[in-house]
Image (cartoon, rainbow, N blue to C red):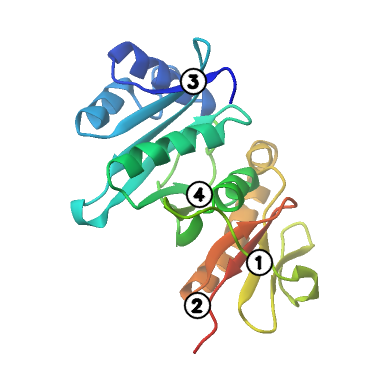
Amino acid sequence: MTGVSIRTVHDVAGLGAVSAYFGEVWRTPPAAPPFPAEVLRSLVHTGGAVHAAYEGERLVGAAVAVFGPPASKATYSLVAAAEPGLGQVVKQAQRAWALGLGARTMRWTFDPLVARNARFNLAKLGAVGTEYVIDFYGPMTDGVNGGDESDRLTVTWDLAAPGPSYDPGDREAAPATHRAPDGATLARRDLADLRVWCRVPDDVVNLRSADPVLALRWRRAVREVFTDAFEQGFRATGMSRDGWYTLTREAAV
């Protein structure tokens, strides 16, 4: 993207700026950022990477990744954030770094109720949701997640894959299976039993602030759909523009 540069950060001052940036994104007190500078420094020292995106000298995005077990040829992205339109730039920088060191996949987690993140991870990058974890972090007190249970969807990104490719199927033709907290359909399942569709709220971050009880009802409703589907071999492979996940599985041979 014109005017934006990406570089790896190693120095204490640069890492401090990245730490402060994450604090702004997650709305934490300045004295308690989600990733303190000293933690970032240790991760870099052990072979991880902190990538930062700059527009001129202004920090506009950052991501942190480390390697998994040596034999796995996998990396793990601990955190990533960017201003609108710059997420792809940051993730592709991580991808290039990982591929350059011989990695084949990258994993990370995100809140499955945040539709825009789901669309970015699944529809734009082509990652696949491979694991649903209930209350991954336990109680969280930041300004984005506070008051909710911290369920997370783990995604796996094939770094050598050409890009996203999936068939969303005909959602409207499938029978409804679950009702959402707003009274409308939450989930559908096709008659061939190869696809499940599940809806999430339009803006769960604002919903948590306005009505935390309702937000928690959404959390538990979506959790039920996902955990049941994952136990039956489904994986999250897509997200529509109107907030519907597509979960798919292979036909039995």
Q: Residue 216: which numbered mark, if any? A: none
The residue carrying pointer 4 sits among few (fewer than 14), some (14 to 19) or many (20 or more) residues within 10 Å by Cα, namely some
Identify the disc placed on residue 167.
Answer: 1
The residues bearing labels 3 and 2 have C-alpha atoms spaced at a distance of 44 Å
Q: Report if residue 44 is visible in the image.
A: yes
Q: Quadrant of residue 236?
A: bottom right
Q: First in sequence, mark 3 or 1: give its number.
A: 3
- Dot 1 amino acid type: Asp
Mark-to-mark CA distance, 3 and 4: 36 Å
Mark 4 vs mark 1: give the one in front.
Answer: 1
The residue labelled by disc 2 is 232
The three-letter amino acid code for the residue at tag 3 is Ser
Q: Secondary structure at mark 2?
A: loop
Residue that protrudes farthest toward the bottom in the picture: 253
| Mark sitting earlier along the chain (1/2) | 1
Q: Distance from label 3 to label 1 (Cα)?
A: 35 Å
Left or right relative to 25: residue 18: left
Q: Tell which of 54 and 242 is nearer to you.
A: 54
Residue 185 location, quadrant = bottom right
In this figure, which residue is indicated by the disc labeled 3? 5
Mark closest to the chain's N terminus, 2 or 4: 4
Q: Earlier in the sequence, mark 4 or mark 1?
A: 4
**Looking at the picture, which amino acid does disc 2 mark?**
Gln
